[in-house]
Structures are given as C-alpha cells and as structure tokens.
Image (cartoon, grey):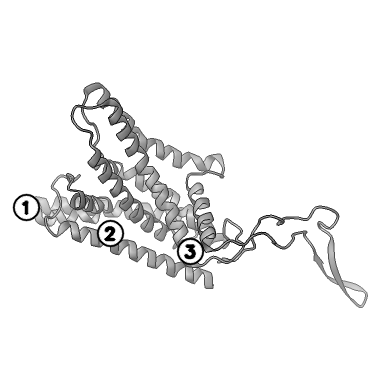
C-alpha cells in the first residue's frame, strides 16, 4: 500500500504556459529514437509541510465526510442519510407522543438497543468504504506532504467511523431531549438518563467502529466487507436469542442472563446498566454482581483485539 504521496498545496499542479506537456528529453541509438521521457508539467511542492497531527486530522475529516457521502456522488449520500432519517424518526414520534399524552415515549437508554438493526446496516454499508478502496487500488484519497504511518492511518479511520456512529446515535437522543424540554412533561426532565445514554453512545460507537472496520479491512471488495459485517451481527444476534430461549426453557435463568452478552448491543447495554444504574433493555436482565464488570472487560478486550488486528493488517499491507 502506498503511504507516501507528494502533497498538493500552494504551487503544486500543472505548470501554465508552454512547458506543459513538453518533451523533456529523448535518447537515440544509431540515429533512431529508443525512448522518450515526457514532462507532464507538475512542479515540486514548495508549500508548508505540516506534521503528523495535521495529516491525521485531514485524513479523519476526509473519511468522516465520505462516510456520509459528502464530496461524493449523489448516490453515495442516499444510504447514510436514509439511515439517519430512520434513526431520527422514533425521536420525532416520541416528541409527538409527549406533546399529546404528556408521557415519555421511547426512553433514552433504550434508543440504541431498539434501533440496533439500523446501526448494524449503517456499519455494514459504510465500514468497507473507509478501507476497501485504499486496499484495492493501493492509494490514499489525499495527497500528503510527508509519509503517514500505518498507526496514523488506522487511528484516522477508526476515529472517523466512531464520530459517524456517534452522530447517528447522539443526534436523535439530543433531539428527543430538546423535545422533552420544550414539551415540559410533568415532573423533572430525564437529564440523568439522557447523559447516561450519551455516555453509552460513545461506548457503542467505539466498539462498533472497531469491529466493523476490522472486519472490512480483511477484504478489498466492498461487497464482501458488507456481507462480513452484517453476517457477524446476524450470527451473534441469532445465537444470543437461541441460547436465551433454550436456557430459559430449561429453567436455567442465570445462564440465560449471560447468553444475552453474546449480542454486542446487549453487551454494551449491560455495561450501561452497571455504570449508570438504568433499567436493562432485555426481558430478564443481566447477571448480577459480576455481569457488569465482565461485560465492560469484554468490550475493552474486543476493542483491543480489533485495533491490534487492524494495525497488523495495515503494517503488512504497507510492506507488501
């Protein structure tokens, strides 16, 4: 993978004037031309050279814009903005419910778990965009004035996907909270639940982006990347539901409470339940005492494993 590219900037680009496209030189052997070198007119970069931080920020912003289709074709904007609209719709409906019946609709801690299918589709659709074209064509989307390392590249891609997911989860939560304040429900506003949900949204965003980008990085084909991410989500969800059903049918409720943690969304929900003391968003709750710490440790371990896999993947790609 090419990590070093000459960067654009002041003075970078085709020369104007008669030198553009001029023939720079030719060699002859026994009077016959044997090779021609063309000067395509690019000048040396003589602008300012920023550090690694600037390159990281530029790659992060470019990737974040690309996830939502900004700066890309109109077709690229359809999926992310359609999913953003679907994520926001329950918040709008809940505000309408609060305005008419003066009762809270969808609660803040339950929002991400309720909309987990939408989040999974967004992750599956947009994670391959971040890494697949770079791997397939072996170029970066930006010209850099200095080399960027594999670690910087991985950090920029993960940060971009984390911010994209945080916007997707946090925006409807904030809209719902603003609606609750405007409707002025009886009793105090649910400020604690809102901030608990926003804190959990950060955990969701980091975990899902690490898993999604890591899975997508193992193939340069976007279609395979989409299939791998959605397959992992469907598999973990199905395994969790089947295990819970089987264990509860045999009256093994304690083991069934652990089976919920197979699903990454309920895994984070268990952390939310432990950290903020909010109600669990499943039918039977999570394991008491050790359930929360074990779920938090599992989240940290999964994130660390995915980041390590990404770094190794791109170090190998950069050296090949």
- Compared with 6, 257 (above or below) is above
Residue placed most toward the observer, 186 or 82: 186
Q: Are marks 1 and 3 in contact (CB under 8 Å)?
A: no
Q: Secondary structure at mark 2?
A: helix
Q: Which residue is mark 2?
A: 299
Q: Quadrant of the N terminus?
A: bottom right
Badge 1 density bin: few <14, some 14–19, many ≥20, Cα 10 Å:
few
Q: CA distance from mark 1 to mark 3?
A: 50 Å
Badge 3 density bin: few <14, some 14–19, many ≥20, Cα 10 Å:
some
Residue 283 is drawn in which quadrant?
top left
Instruction: Of the two numbered discs 3 and 2 on the same chain, state the one appearing first in sequence.
Output: 3
Q: CA distance from mark 3 to mark 2?
A: 23 Å
Q: Position of residue 258 (x, y in %)?
A: 16, 56
- Compared with 242, 219 (above or below) is below
Question: Residue 209 bears which disc, if any?
Answer: none
Q: Position of residue 55 (x, y in %)?
A: 54, 59
Q: Residue furthest left?
A: 251
Using residue 59 as the reference point, say whether residue 115 is left or right of it: left
Name the residue rendered at 37%, 47% in the picture.
166
Q: Position of residue 246 (x, y in %)?
A: 14, 53
Name the residue rendered at 50%, 47% in the picture.
65
Residue placed most toward the observer, 12 or 208: 12
Count the labels in the image.
Answer: 3
Q: Are marks 3 and 2 in contact (CB under 8 Å)?
A: no
Q: Position of residue 81 (x, y in %)?
A: 45, 39
Q: Which residue is mark 3?
A: 152
Using residue 179 as the reference point, say whether residue 189 is left or right of it: left
Res 315 visible: yes
Name the residue rendered at 34%, 66% in the picture.
305
Question: Residue 251 bears which disc, if any?
Answer: 1
User: Of tags 1 and 3, which is closer to the observer?
Assistant: 3
């Amino acid at each position: 993978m090419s990590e070093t590219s000459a960067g654009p900037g002041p003075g970078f680009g085709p020369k104007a004037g008669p030198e553009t496209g001029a023939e720079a030189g030719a060699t002859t052997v026994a009077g016959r031309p044997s090779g021609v070198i063309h000067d395509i007119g690019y000048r040396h970069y003589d602008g300012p050279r920023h550090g690694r931080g600037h390159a990281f920020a530029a790659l992060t912003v470019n990737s974040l814009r690309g996830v939502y289709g900004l700066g890309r074709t109109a077709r690229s904007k359809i999926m992310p903005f359609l999913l953003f609209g679907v994520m926001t719709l329950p918040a709008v409906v809940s505000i309408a419910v609060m305005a008419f019946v003066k009762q809270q609709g969808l609660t803040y801690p339950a929002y991400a778990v309720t909309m987990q299918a939408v989040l999974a589709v967004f992750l599956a659709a947009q994670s391959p965009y971040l890494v697949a074209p770079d791997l397939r064509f072996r170029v970066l989307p930006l010209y850099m004035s200095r080399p960027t390392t594999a670690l910087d590249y991985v950090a920029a891609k993960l940060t971009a996907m984390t911010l994209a997911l945080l916007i997707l989860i946090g925006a409807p939560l904030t809209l719902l909270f603003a609606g609750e304040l405007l409707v002025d429900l009886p009793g105090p506003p649910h400020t604690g639940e809102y901030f608990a949900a926003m804190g959990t949204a950060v955990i969701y965003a980091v975990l899902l982006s690490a898993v999604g980008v890591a899975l997508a990085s193992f193939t340069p084909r976007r279609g395979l990347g989409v299939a791998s991410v959605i397959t992992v989500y469907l598999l973990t969800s199905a395994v969790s539901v089947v295990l819970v059903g089987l264990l509860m049918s045999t009256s093994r409720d304690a083991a069934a409470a652990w089976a919920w943690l197979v699903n990454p969304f309920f895994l984070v929900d268990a952390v939310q339940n432990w950290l903020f003391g909010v109600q669990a968003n499943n039918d039977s709750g999570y394991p008491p005492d050790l359930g929360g710490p074990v779920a938090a440790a599992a989240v940290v371990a999964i994130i660390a494993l995915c980041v390590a896999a990404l770094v190794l993947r791109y170090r190998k790609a950069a050296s090949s």
